[in-house]
Amino acid sequence: MQAKDFEGLLCHLKKNYTLDQINGLLSCPNEDARKVAALALSLVGGRCAIPMLEQRLKDADPMSNQMAEHALWSIWFRLGTTQANAELAHGAQCLTDRAFDCAFSHFNRAIELCPDFAEPFNQRAIAHYLLENYELSVVDCRRATELMPCHFGAWAGLGHSHAHLGRIKPAIECYERVLSINPHLDCIRDALRELRKQLKAQQND
């Protein structure tokens, strides 16, 4: 029943609304309208919706922020070709199962199929990070942020890897970039606070 409801909603959106109309609702003063727009874009939105959703990450309403964040992740996962998107989805499932060889195989294939697709680089960076291959994670995070500058997840991953490598200043810069994009990420704010303390302690030594 839920699958049918989802398919019905998707069909309804595509049939009755243009992406421009949905995008326009994101700037509506009504909070509920913004939430509905973010939900719709998580289902049907594409690259053109990203700038408006990025703005909604700064929304004072936490729920609007969370829905914009969810919509962005959904869009990032489908910005490649149909086949590249499928490879990415398979790789992400392998990553969840901690089947790293399988995950790398799918991410590599997605990148081969669509070299300007940011999310396979980000997901591959996560796999490297979990395996404590921090330098390789840095390389992939950098590529993801080059392709998708508003990718707060990739910026956070880059900061995490720098922190593990003892590069406090670059880690701080990455975390500051994350919060400039998505200021509601309290875990990053906490990590930034700790790194600033470490940096200050080093400077006082």
Image (tube, rainbow, N blue to C red):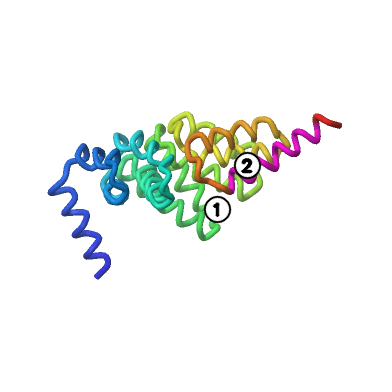
**Quadrant of residue 10 within the rendered picture:** bottom left
Residue at (63, 49) in percent of width and height: 131
Image side of residue 35 versus residue 184, left or right: left
Q: Relative to 189, is 90 above or below? A: below
Task: Identify the amino acid type marked 2.
Answer: His
Image disc number at residue 160 = 2
Q: Is residue 119 left or right of residue 170?
A: left
| In the displayed structure image, the side of residue 26 where residue 149 appears, left or right | right
Residue at image coords 39%, 42%: 76
Helix or strand or loop: what does disc 1 sit on? helix
Q: Which residue of the protein is positioned furthest toward the left in this rendering?
A: 16
Asked whether 111 or 1 is in front, the reply is: 1
Residue that label 1 marks: 100
Instruction: Provide residue 190's location: percent of width, then percent of height.
Output: 63, 46
Residue 27, horizontal then vertical, whole percent:
29, 38
Task: State the extent of the magenta-drawn residues as a range.
Answer: 187-202
- For the residues labelled 1 and 2, the Cα–Cα distance comes to 20 Å
Pointer 1 local density, CA inside 10 Å: few below 14, some 14–19, many at least 20 = some
Residue type at the position of mark 1:
Phe
Residue 201 counted in the magenta span: yes
Magenta: main secondary structure equals helix
- Reply yes or no: does residue 199 show up in magenta: yes
Which residue is found at the position 40% from the left and 52% from the top? 63
